Image: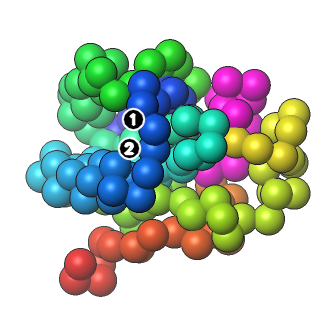
Amino acid sequence: MLVRLLYASRATGGIDDALLGSLVENSRANNLEHGITGLLCVYPEGGVFLQVLEGARPAVNRLYGNLVGDRRHADITLLDYTEIEERMFSAWRMGCVDLKKVNLSTILRYSERPVLDPYSMTGRGALALLEELSKTAAIVSRDLGRGH
């Protein structure tokens, strides 16, 4: 059975390119092994992560449990969890949105302000934002099915 889990968290330290690169590469390696796909959206200036994970219930639950225990994250908030018939983000072991290439009106459509603040969004709104970003924004490596 497939599930989709959407959460937000705050970084306990600064978010720089090295940390982001490390998170994405480690996620891609681990997620491939466990059949997890998803998308990560990071707002470094606000220290905020918004991530959606899809896969088998036990694998997604285990990963979320690991994230809750990860000291690099604080204020972890579950925004949505649902059983799904098919994956919405199947093209990515872990895609990463480049917010520098996103029109701020896209974020404002789903949020109170034109900055990524998933804590002020509904789970449904946050998921809709990620779905739109996956289709229109610059994603760092659309990696499944392309030999990467």
Q: Residues within 10 Å of mark 2 (few under 14, many from 20)?
A: many
- List x then y, in percent, for residue 79: 58, 24
Q: Please, what is the dominant secondary structure of the magenta stretch?
A: helix
Q: Inspect the image, locate mark 1, and give the three-letter code of the amino acid beneath it.
A: Val
Q: Residue furthest bottom?
A: 146
Could you tell me if residue 9 is visible in this image?
A: yes
The quadrant in which the C terminus is found is bottom left
Marks 1/2: CA distance?
6 Å
Could you tell me if residue 35 is visible in this image?
A: no
Is disc 1 in contact with disc 2, using a CB cutoff of under 8 Å?
Answer: yes
139 left or right, relative to 12: right
* Residue corresponding to mark 2: 54
* Magenta residues, start to end: 117-130
Image position of 134 with respect to 12: above or below = below
- List x then y, in percent, for residue 110: 81, 42
Q: Nearer the viewer, residue 75 or 135?
A: 75
Residue 119: within the magenta?
yes
Residue at (22% x, 83% y) in the render: 147
Residue 3: within the magenta?
no
- List x then y, in percent, for residue 12: 42, 25
* Residue corresponding to mark 1: 3
Residue at (66% x, 32% y) in the render: 118
Q: Inspect the image, locate mark 2, and give the three-letter code of the amino acid beneath it.
A: Glu
